[in-house]
Amino acid sequence: MPNMSLKKNPMPEQAPDIRNKNFDEVSLGYTEEQAIDEAKRCLNCKNKPCVGGCPVHIHIPAFIEKVAQGEFEEAYKIITEASSLPAVCGRVCPQESQCEQRCVRGIKGEPVAIGRLERFVADRHNSLAEKKIDKPSPNGHKVAVVGSGPAGLACAGELAKKGYDVTVFEALHLAGGVLVYGIPEFRLPKSIVAEEIEGLRALGVKVETNTVIGKTITIDELQGEYGYEAVFIGSGAGLPKFMGIDGENLRGVYSANEFLTRINLMKAYREDSATPIQRAKKVAVVGGGNVAMDAARCAKRFGAEVYIVYRRGLEELPARREEVEHAKEEGIIFKTLTNPKAILGDDTRSVCGMTCVEMELGEPDASGRRKPIEKPNSEFTLDVDCVIMALGTSPNPLIKSTTEGLETQSWGGILADEMGKTSREGVFAGGDAVTGAATVILAMGAGKTAAKAIDEYIMNK
């Protein structure tokens, strides 16, 4: 019998007043019964609009039908035909603006919980004692992948399935890119990322950590003496942006990148951690995206009173609705229509406050959003001892500055066509290194597309 409920099966979660004091995962996942019941809400539409909303084009109705029938491993096989990281995507993809946005059930109620079902299927598979992966036969061709974030891992996985000898080069000591340094444990447990990467290793993908391309090895060397027939650059966008206001060099001012890296990659929240991080009493996080929510929720778990300072209104927040609601439930204070003007320091050059002004929204700007305008005579001081800047990131210039013939865009991103081909022969690029900071699934889509282009390039060559 189909389930015609207008509402999704709710996701079991830790209670807000408990989870805001620990780094355990907030969402606990569906049971088998909940997953089957939710899967039965799918109408298996003839035109499958949800598939068109998925950047990696998972056959969504097909996998959900298998879940409804209790054939969970078959569902997993269908998902992994298109996606290399289903347990990750089921947790961090903005399904509400992609596949679920196009779900027919969302017209008169809530859409099918596609992301929650993907997570359930992947988690169940990963919990099995025996997992068999059929390693493809080698095709005799070598490809290098720069960066082990979502774009690089997706590209590596697609090529490995075709029999390519793939090596992923990662600058940090742990593979995963933004998945391990940027997204908190309570949203994406690092054991999940490690599990997904082990699956790629089982396909034959090699991972070389502590290797900075452009410094340890250059693109020239990869294509020359190392013998790689093609290179994919998926090095992300890890260079933080600042406002350029007074006081940004004070003690107690972090970029969100540094703050989250210390917590997520270097485990600053553990009692035995050797990673220094300020245990602030009052924290201002400047920005309104997912990274700002992550930083604010981490700071809350360290016991601070936390403010989100954002120059537009609540409706204009670019963060996922779910993340905003979780932050509110956990006690984060939203100071919207507020813009920092200067960070104040004490005699020890440590943060002791932040000067702000109130804003109001005017006519839409070039982005289509209403432009924030400063209110006259609205200046006030916010009492904080730590400021975290979560204003976005841009690609690190190291690769472009050490690679001849690699054209870049005016703002620093690598110039690549829709298939990932760059101006340099045999070099492809995708994800945040090309587009600037975006979502995990869009980066994966770019990596998957580039893998197809690399395969065609090498086979034609």
Image: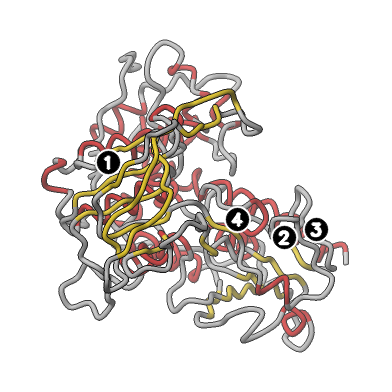
Q: Residue furthest left?
A: 18
Q: Which amino acid is tagged 2?
A: Ile
Residue 74 on image: x %, y % = 43, 43
**Mark 2 or 4, nearer chain start:** 2
Q: Which tag is nearer the camera, tag 4 or tag 3?
A: 4
Above or below 388: residue 112: above
**Mark 1 or 2, nearer chain start:** 1
Tag count in the figure? 4
In this picture, residue 21 sits left or right of residue 98: left
Residue under pointer 2: 414
Residue under pointer 1: 327
Crowd band around label 4 with a 10 angstrom C-alpha radius: few (<14), some (14–19), many (20+): many
Disc 3 element: helix
Residue 435 on image: x %, y % = 65, 51
Residue under pointer 3: 456
Residues under labels 3 and 1: Cα distance? 45 Å
**Mark sitting on residue 432:** 4
Q: Which amino acid is tagged 4?
A: Asp
Residues under labels 2 and 4: Cα distance? 9 Å
Above or below 155: residue 218: below
> Do residues under tags 4 and 3 come within 8 Å of each other at their CB atoms?
no
Q: Which amino acid is tagged 3?
A: Glu
